[in-house]
Image (spheres, helix red, strand yellow):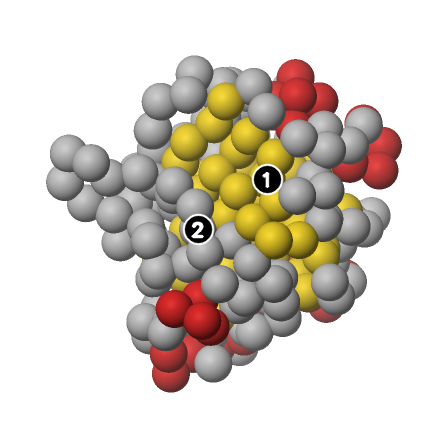
């Protein structure tokens, strides 16, 4: 899958994308996740280059920890409940399971609900199912890396949109996030369909939650 133009997730965890540098992992990254298996969790933390990245939640001895901010299973199935627990919490990782696909995104800037585009091109999407990282290619004055309102969080304008009670979410890649997919494939790449219902949504802080 990485030949499409994105980086393979597994190449990082095996050392192929990280320059041979060993990264210290927390003993159980994404512990008790309902989206990721333990093996996927360890691979993902290494693959996304976050194992040693400090965040507002980090302490010197636990910089590589992950902590659950929001789970649709535990905290209510709504974007408003997600906002209540995640806004202003720094860099986060959004995980989604839908139609048997596992995917999500790294938000390099804290979530808000202002209805104004924000964020930086350091944000990215990824598919665990397809073993690929999807970079943000937005640039210029009109760049849209992240967007959110009371009832929506989005990567790009339409690359990945989680709305309402997660029953009518959507994805249309190759807008702000790209690996060179053709249009028909871009619409179904993440979740197997352009419009989909999420089985589970989680948001993780990259460090112990405050």
Which residue was labeled with disc 2?
159
In the image, 101: left or right of 94? right
- The residues tagged by marks 2 and 1 sit, at their Cα atoms, a distance apart of 10 Å
Q: Is residue 103 above or below residue 59?
A: below
Q: Is residue 53 above or below residue 45?
A: above
> Quadrant of the rendered structure where residue 150 is?
top right
Q: Tell me where residue 193 appears, x and y as whole percent.
A: 61, 63
Point out which mark residue 162 bears. 1
Point out which mark residue 24 bears. none
Q: Is residue 7 above or below residue 119?
A: below
Q: Is residue 140 visible?
A: yes
Near mark 2 (Cα within 10 A), the count class, few <14, some 14-19 or many ≥20, is many
Q: Is residue 50 visible?
A: no
Residue at 42%, 78% in the rendered image: 2
User: Between residues 83 and 64, which one lies in front from this camera angle?
Assistant: 83
User: Between residues 47 and 104, which one lies in front from this camera angle?
Assistant: 104
Near mark 1 (Cα within 10 A), the count class, few <14, some 14-19 or many ≥20, is many
Q: Tell me where residue 58 appears, x and y as whole percent.
A: 54, 31
In the image, 200: left or right of 141? right
Quarter of the picture holding the C terminus: top right
Q: Judging from the image, what secondary structure is the residue with disc 1 in?
A: strand
Q: Tell me where residue 62 appears, x and y as whole percent.
A: 61, 38
Residue at 76%, 47% in the rendered image: 200
The mark tally for this picture is: 2
> Quadrant of the rendered structure where residue 135 is?
bottom left
Check whether the beta carbons of the residues at disc 2 and disc 1 lie within 8 A of each other: no
Residue at 72%, 49% in the rendered image: 197
> Quadrant of the rendered structure where residue 84 is?
top right
Q: Residue furthest left?
A: 140
Q: Judging from the image, what secondary structure is the residue with disc 2 in?
A: loop
Residue at 42%, 21% in the rendered image: 115
């Amino acid at each position: 899958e990485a030949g499409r133009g994105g980086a393979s997730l597994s190449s990082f965890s095996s050392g192929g994308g990280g320059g041979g540098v060993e990264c210290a992992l927390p003993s159980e990254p994404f512990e008790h996740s309902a989206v990721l298996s333990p093996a996927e969790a360890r691979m993902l933390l290494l693959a996304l280059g976050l194992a040693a990245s400090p965040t507002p939640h980090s302490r010197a001895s636990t910089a590589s920890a992950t902590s659950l901010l929001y789970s649709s299973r535990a905290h209510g199935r709504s974007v408003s409940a997600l906002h209540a627990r995640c806004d202003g919490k720094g860099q986060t990782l959004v995980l989604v399971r839908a139609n048997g696909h596992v995917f999500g995104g790294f938000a390099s800037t804290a979530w808000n609900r202002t209805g104004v585009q924000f964020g930086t091109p350091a944000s990215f999407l990824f598919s665990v199912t397809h073993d690929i990282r999807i970079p943000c290619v937005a640039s210029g004055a009109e760049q849209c890396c992240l967007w959110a309102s009371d009832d929506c969080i989005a990567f790009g304008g339409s690359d990945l949109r989680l709305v309402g009670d997660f029953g009518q979410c959507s994805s249309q890649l190759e807008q702000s996030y790209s690996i060179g997919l053709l249009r028909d494939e871009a619409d179904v790449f993440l979740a197997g369909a352009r419009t989909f219902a999420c089985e589970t949504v989680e948001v993780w802080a990259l460090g112990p939650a405050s």
